[in-house]
Amino acid sequence: MTNAKAVGKKSYSKPTVRKLTQEQAKKLIVDRANCSDQEATKIMESLMAGDENLSADQAKELADEMTALAKQQSEALQTATYIKMSKKEAQQYDKRAVRISELCGLLGTFRPDLGKKS
């Protein structure tokens, strides 16, 4: 059996969990989603609001936004079938995909108030 160090492989080390500051989290979002500081702030607010209950009006707003974004994604893919996406269009596509994912997470926590039975 060959020693791991002899072949240049690192031995396993347990991953560490670090808590990010709000600024570090925002920078991470800006870098990963390739978005502005304002968009990153909106994303962070959406994620932090995920623990709160959404009203029916808020859920409808989010669902409407997701519908519009999904339509834009579909149109972009249809166009890309014939004309290659530019780098800017691909970045916009990726931003919409990130936002759709966030919206799915937020809407997944929505529990409509069906009223109390008497």
Image: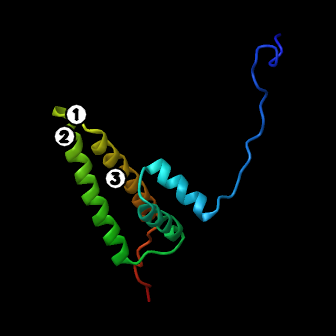
Q: CA distance from mark 2 to mark 3?
A: 16 Å
Q: Is residue 13 above or below residue 88?
A: above
Question: For the N terminus, which image quadrant?
Answer: top right
Residue 1 as seen in the image, left or right of residue 91: right
Q: Which residue is mark 2?
A: 78
Instruction: Please give the name of the residue rendered at 36% of the width and 71% of the height, measured from the top-left corner.
Output: 59
Q: Which residue is mark 3?
A: 96
SS for callout 2: helix
Mark 1 or mark 2: which is in front?
A: 1
Instruction: Please give the name of the residue rendered at 44% of the width and 50% of the height, measured from the top-left corner.
Output: 33
Q: Which is more N-terminal, label 1 or label 3?
A: 1
Question: Extreme top residue here?
Answer: 1
Question: For the C terminus, which image quadrant?
Answer: bottom left
Q: CA distance from mark 1 to mark 2?
A: 10 Å
Q: Disc 1 marks which amino acid?
A: Lys
Instruction: Please give the name of the residue rendered at 22% of the width and 33% of the height, measured from the top-left corner.
Output: 84
